[in-house]
Image: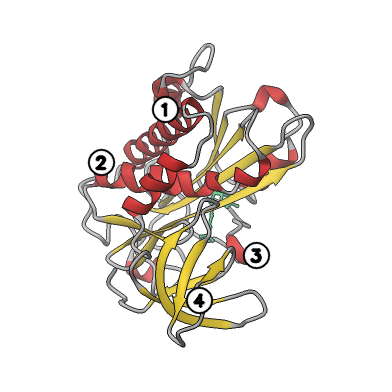
Amino acid sequence: MYTDLNRPPLGVDALRRALVGDSPGDDPRAFYSSLDVVAETGSTNADLLARAADTALDRAVLVAEFQGHGRGRHARVWEAPPRSALAVSVLLRMPGLDVARLGWLPLLTGVAVVDALRTVAEVDAKLKWPNDVLIGGRKVAGILAEVAQTAPVPAVVVGVGLNVTLTQDELPVPTATSLALAGAATTYRDTVLRAVLRELAAQWNAWHADGWSTESLAAAYRARCGTIGQPVRVTLPGERVLVGVASDVDEQGRLVVAPDDGGEPVVVSAGDVTHLRPRD
Ligand SMILES: O=C(O)CCCC[C@@H]1SC[C@@H]2NC(=O)N[C@@H]21
């Protein structure tokens, strides 16, 4: 099934040197407490969630060269051939953050992935609400955040799956793409992973310094979101379909849609969005 297993492994020692601090702090270059790369696991999100009660794992990073049961949003699977994608999870706690704002973390992660890809891969990456990362209308990365109710502060495991060197034949669905297929300036996974984790740390630090306020974060999200201003079809829970124009995200990161039937704006907290101008 997989065409080329001779792809290079990630260089864990260099990644650790670049990203892990002796006493992890505000510097995005040494933000993380640990970084591990495993050859194979079921799901990096599941692995960190299972160990979320261990406070030593705050800001831990777990990367898998291959996931047998990668988890996607809406209970879907997330698949990629070995060593051709990034499958990375980070465990974060945000003391003092109102739990109602936890939902911003996957959106913040989306902002970080977009910035990393624009910078090192030189691609025109954009977000499709809530946090699919698209290039030319095709999905290159997905984000799944899951919460563990640890006391006194919940732990959030945020996972990123990013297609790097997948060939056309290896794409899980025709609407996906990879950095290689999108003509990225680099398909070196170490470079991309380093950029993603540094941007995530920088965004997280900025949000923390801002007292977990959502104003600047929402502005950063809007600036990178290709859904706002788009005609969209939204499949809501229960398979109800909403068609209209996405006008904004609100203070909780929910999508506001002006329906085509002229009704009141609908605030969407969960749903599957299709852009009706497919290249955006
Ligand atoms: O459905 C989506 O778009 C989200 C996909 C998230 C996949 C990543 S890969 C690393 C982490 N571990 C998982 O099991 N899922 C996430």
Sequence-wise, which precedes: disc 2 or disc 1?
Answer: 1
Q: Residue drawn 52% across and 17% down?
A: 24
Say few, some or many: other residues with alpha carbon within 10 Å of mark 4 (under 14 / 14 to 19 / 20 or more): many
> Which one is in front, 143 or 98?
98
Measured in 3D between alpha carbons, the distance from the residue under mark 3 to the one under mark 2, in whole angstroms, is 31 Å
Say few, some or many: other residues with alpha carbon within 10 Å of mark 1 (under 14 / 14 to 19 / 20 or more): some
Where does the image place residue 254, in percent across and percent down from the top left? 53, 59
Where does the image place residue 191, in percent across and percent down from the top left? 32, 36
Q: Are marks 2 and 4 in contact (CB under 8 Å)?
A: no
Measured in 3D between alpha carbons, the distance from the residue under mark 1 to the one under mark 3, in whole angstroms, is 31 Å
Callout 1, which amino acid?
Leu
Screen quadrant of the C terminus: bottom left
Say few, some or many: other residues with alpha carbon within 10 Å of mark 3 (under 14 / 14 to 19 / 20 or more): few
> Which one is in front, 114 or 247?
247
* Helix, strand or loop status at disc 1: helix
Nearest to viewer (mark 2 / mark 4): 4
Callout 2, which amino acid?
Val
Left or right of 206, for residue 41? right
Callout 4, which amino acid?
Val
Left or right of 258, for residue 226? left
For label 2, the residue is 120
Measured in 3D between alpha carbons, the distance from the residue under mark 2 to the one under mark 1, in whole angstroms, is 16 Å
Nearest to viewer (mark 3 / mark 4): 4
Q: Residue drawn 51% across and 51% down?
A: 251
Sequence-wise, which precedes: disc 1 or disc 3?
Answer: 1
For label 4, the residue is 234
Identify the mark at residue 15; answer none if there is no mark: 1
Identify the mark at residue 75; answer none if there is no mark: 3
Nearest to viewer (mark 1 / mark 3): 3
